[in-house]
Image: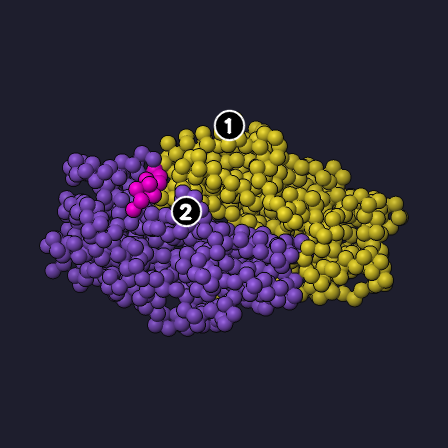
Chain colours: A yellow, B purple
Amino acid sequence: MALKGNCIVAQSGGPTAVINASACGVVQEAMKHKEIEGIYGAINGVLGILNEEIFDFREESPGDIEGLKYTPSAALGSCRYKLKSLEESREDYARIMEVFKAHNIRYFFYIGGNDSMDTADKITRLAKEMGYEMRVMGIPKTVDNDLAFTDHCPGYGSIAKYNAAAVMEAGLDTDAIYTSDTCTIYEAMGRNAGWIAAATALARRQEGDAPHLIYMPETPFTIEQFVKDCREVLSKFGRLFIVAGEGLKGKDGKYITAATGEFAKDSFGHVQLGGVADVLREIVEKQVKVKARFNKLGTCQREAMHFASKTDRDEAYLCGQMAVKHAVEEDITGKMVSLVRESDEPYKCTTGLVNLVDVANAEKPLPRECINEAGNFVTDDFIRYARPLIQGEVAVPIENGLPNYIRLKRKPIPKECPPELELHRGGVGKQVEKIGGNSYEDQKF
Amino acid sequence: MALKGNCIVAQSGGPTAVINASACGVVQEAMKHKEIEGIYGAINGVLGILNEEIFDFREESPGDIEGLKYTPSAALGSCRYKLKSLEESREDYARIMEVFKAHNIRYFFYIGGNDSMDTADKITRLAKEMGYEMRVMGIPKTVDNDLAFTDHCPGYGSIAKYNAAAVMEAGLDTDAIYTSDTCTIYEAMGRNAGWIAAATALARRQEGDAPHLIYMPETPFTIEQFVKDCREVLSKFGRLFIVAGEGLKGKDGKYITAATGEFAKDSFGHVQLGGVADVLREIVEKQVKVKARFNKLGTCQREAMHFASKTDRDEAYLCGQMAVKHAVEEDITGKMVSLVRESDEPYKCTTGLVNLVDVANAEKPLPRECINEAGNFVTDDFIRYARPLIQGEVAVPIENGLPNYIRLKRKPIPKECPPELELHRGGVGKQVEKIGGNSYEDQKF
């Protein structure tokens, strides 16, 4: 018999176009199971649990819950709060279990990347140690597509589709105005993996189409080869469209650019990147001697539900739904739902289960066989892999010419845990409320 | 009786999502008039005329011509080649007339901004002086929306709609992840006018929605006021979404940033901009003390047909169509088709005619009454003006998950002018062919 109690869902890390679809899958599936009583959401990921800022999905309208399917970004709120080992972040883990107990939370669904799977894994182990019966399930989410043990990640298909469309369109711009604006550089997200940059290759339908060159973090970047590549393209086509992953590294393994100053690292210790396109622009102007400009779509890339992949959205929903099914119907815990590709053509994909601990902190770079020998474009292998992921469009309701995305009410339910304990934690919640900002950087987690 | 002969259409300056719709309007209307024999296109704007690179629309498939209605960028090719006064650019103007005569071109339809209207005006005068009977019509095009004597410009509605959608989506990103990534800066196009930045205000549906602050080139930018504005928004909402026009200027009237180096100016002498968002990011991090990132969509903004305004597209087509009608049916010459708004609600817009010479080299900044007193947002007046321009979406055919834009064949027709004369011009055409790039910068026009 299934475990009875309340469930909570939380979203973590950088938002995506379809992370809400996963939450919707969790909530709509949970509603089908009478064992699940309260269906809660944590406001701003694990921070919402630590601060006991929790809302009840049964207070949200069915229309708004359904609207999560076409609303980008994290409607529950997200965060980049990093829990470390059980020893180092002891108080945080204790607090989480305290809040879970206070609200009789027996199911925890955590939508996030590898750091989040690490947190979920530790909660699983801690609950077991404490003899508190609960089910913990991870739901994959990352535009970076770098989670191991899953064919791909929800969020990736949409950023791939949108970037490919944007490169196609900006490529037509360069085609038209190349006599003066000869080179365009397009910066794609992807700190350590080139999956996103690689996907822009889908924009090319015939020879000469953008992109002409794609540089990914997996192959070392050298100025000499880059300048040579640029000259070759220019002599062939008279124009030049380059895509660069934000995390390009030199032969020494160091980023070719990194922001400096006090905000150069986020709370996970990741270097903040973003200047690659500008660095390449300068090289092109100074060494290749043609005018260059750059486009850096930044966060717009990962939120572009107005041109998102229906395949991706449907799979994101499915992952949320399957997490609940496995936990309730099969008493599964400590696992992440994975995507398992059965065939490319016709594309068929089902779900599987992997251990949270295996996914935690692992990274899956773009395999070498997806990158051409020169390290400046992708192979047909990659195209076969990526093409099915961008199929279909998500219907977004339009009002007054613009998308009509929903907003959850997120009315917090009454707190059950003594505030003394919260204060004991150093008042993290208070800082966040007060400045709404960088408190975690300052704390040097 | 209407003038008999061939017509030519050319596109100039920065492409837009709907400049091809205007070309389509010209071509499809021209096909209805038996007085018009050859319907030609100039490859890469006025360069195509100077180099006698001309193709015949009757060789293109009707499907491709129809496809211009949903294909962004300049399908004929564009350029930034600037003709100066009749005295200074004497050889160029002579060459243009020579090519027109050689191909019996009696109608010239020039789709472009104020510089192009200036060129068209000079051609009108020169033809008159030479006693060569022809009709010259300007068709407005600029995402900047800064042409005088027209309510708005084709291209503007689409960039307005897309930027508003992108700000809405990136705004949801900031809403979700503000506890670590507190501030997002969005850089909008617009060298001297704030029309594009202003339009992102349409994204705001309720208090607290992005954008929180919009800075436009029309009001002087001061760091003191900016920092104060940022702090106010942060204390109210805990997060901060800023839109900045690329051409922000200080009280001294100088750009707060300008690229330096050999490509700092384009061939029109315009300063190349693009660094505003990065400048603001640094101020926010150093003085407001919250983490900030920026999105700079660059040329993607003006080419986003995948989420363009149908109103804009239809008006662009209408302008092209009306240019032909006026020229053929009424013997009009030396005029630009303008857009005349009859009412806001319901929105009604017709076309008018203005003298090319009046439009040439004029600029229409955002009126003061469209900007709030603090100079950091727009007024309701502006919203009433802009809202109707972003209504409706353009249906784009999708193939394999991505837009299926058309490409014209553009097979050049045989040259009629002695190549000696072309060489006499200094071989400009050859340079363009050879390096496909910055030849015009080098020539210091």
Q: Chain of mark 1?
A: A
Magenta-tinted stretch: B436-445
- Residue, x 46% and y 65% (percent of image)? B219
Question: Relative to residue A434, is residue B298 drawn left or right?
Answer: left
> Residue B367 in the image: x percent, y percent?
41, 69
Instruction: Report if the CB atoms under discs 1 and 2 are less than 8 Å apart.
Output: no
Which of label 1 and label 2 is nearer to you? 2
Residue that label 2 marks: B264
Question: Relative to residue A264, is residue A242 drawn left or right?
Answer: left
- Residue, x 41% and y 73% (percent of image)? B345
Q: Amino acid at mark 1?
A: Ala
Q: Residues within 10 Å of mark 1 (few under 14, many from 20)?
A: few
- Residue, x 58% and y 32% (percent of image)? A250
Residue that label 1 marks: A374
Q: Chain of mark 2?
A: B
> Residue B44 in the image: x percent, y percent?
30, 45
Q: Amino acid at mark 2?
A: Ala
Along the line of sight, the residue nearer the viewer: A55 or A60: A55
